[in-house]
Amino acid sequence: MDNNSITVVITPRDRYSGIINCIRNLYLCTEQRFELKVIDLDYPRSLKQKIEKELAQHNNAELLSYGLISPIQAMQKVRPLIETEYVMFLDNDSNVTANWLPPLLDIAKTDPQIAVVNPVTLEKEGVDKGAELRNHLFTNAVHTIDYQGEDYLIEHKSFRRSLPEELPQGIQDSEMFELHGVLFSTKALNDIELPDMVIREHIDIGIQLRQKGYKIVTQPESIIIFDNLGTRMAWYDMKFFFFRWHPKYTEASSRLFEQRWGYRFYSEQAMYLWVFRRKVFLFSRWLYVPVNGANMAVRIAAKLRSFIKPVWDPIKGVEQKASPAPLSMFSKAK
């Protein structure tokens, strides 16, 4: 295994658009040597031709075509091909910033038990109005809440939507990550299962890693910028988004997580509502409805859907009442 380089894997997450900018920005912001693998999950022909033309300019890049499958299935396929000590998974609608890589590698190499190093992920303004750039992911953890004698899980994100200047400095411990942009130790990546999920997979992997004694940390000196669906999608983006977030996949993912670990998520129905809201917003924007009008359409549609199919949420202020879930809870893995 090559100890002197890193593999960057760029994968579609929610859309196809953004891939060309993602590739160009990666080369612009990365001085260190790296190998690049761009994953084609059924890109439209015109966009695939642009990708091939872009990659032809570099001798360290290749395009791998896997057809229309989920991002985690793509990870399963590309994992055996990684020959470097570290691998950076980067969504094609995320962009690295200047000097992003050295801080990640510096902390990763201090301890062989560090399996994952998160950069700080900032998001562009999306459905909700707010600052142009704000925190999407700093650290996250699994919390638990008791309802009528049954434990439910909640994902807790620290400093959610905080401004960049409000975030703490220095290395921070975390319990999981998100795949918008994350550095893995290849050894640790090969030491776990990659569950066939479209949601909860980052939580499942985080539990596995911690059970095996690995560490997950956040490095605030490295920054990734994630376009949180703020940019209007093309039609082919809509097609991929609706495929990736189809109820048969999201609900199957929830059941698989429950089967593997023995717990349900308190926010499961709220997640499905979030997906519905996103689809309404994106479709409205695709029709060139202005942002304010698209937000209005989302509110009306969400109210109608919630009237027909209410979201189960019996505990007011549930996130404030939840408490950290000890790792020992997850001994029910099958």
Image: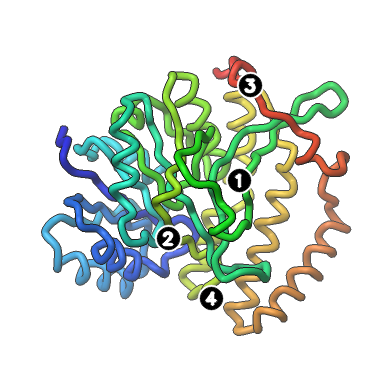
Q: Please tell me whether mark 4 or mark 1 is closer to you in this view.
A: 4
Where is mark 1, residue-wise? Answer: 250
The kind of residue on which mark 4 rests is Arg
Where is mark 2, residue-wise? Answer: 94
Distance from the alpha carbon under mark 3 to that under mark 4: 41 Å
Neighbor class of circle 3 (other Cα within 10 Å; few <14, some 14-19, many 20+) is: few
Neighbor class of circle 2 (other Cα within 10 Å; few <14, some 14-19, many 20+) is: many
The circle drawn on residue 326 is 3
271 relative position to 198: left or right: right
Where is mark 4, residue-wise? Answer: 232
Quadrant location of the N terminus? top left
**Front-most of 333 and 31?**
31
- Residue visible at 15% across and 55% down? 60
- State the image coordinates of residue 118 (x, y, percent, origin top left): 44, 43
Is any atom of residue 70 visible in this view? no
- Residue visible at 61% across and 46% down? 250
Q: Please tell me whether mark 2 or mark 4 is closer to you in this view.
A: 2
Distance from the alpha carbon under mark 1 to that under mark 2: 22 Å
Neighbor class of circle 1 (other Cα within 10 Å; few <14, some 14-19, many 20+) is: many
Q: Please tell me whether mark 1 or mark 2 is closer to you in this view.
A: 2
The kind of residue on which mark 3 rests is Pro
30 relative position to 142: left or right: left
The kind of residue on which mark 2 rests is Ser
Distance from the alpha carbon under mark 2 to that under mark 4: 15 Å
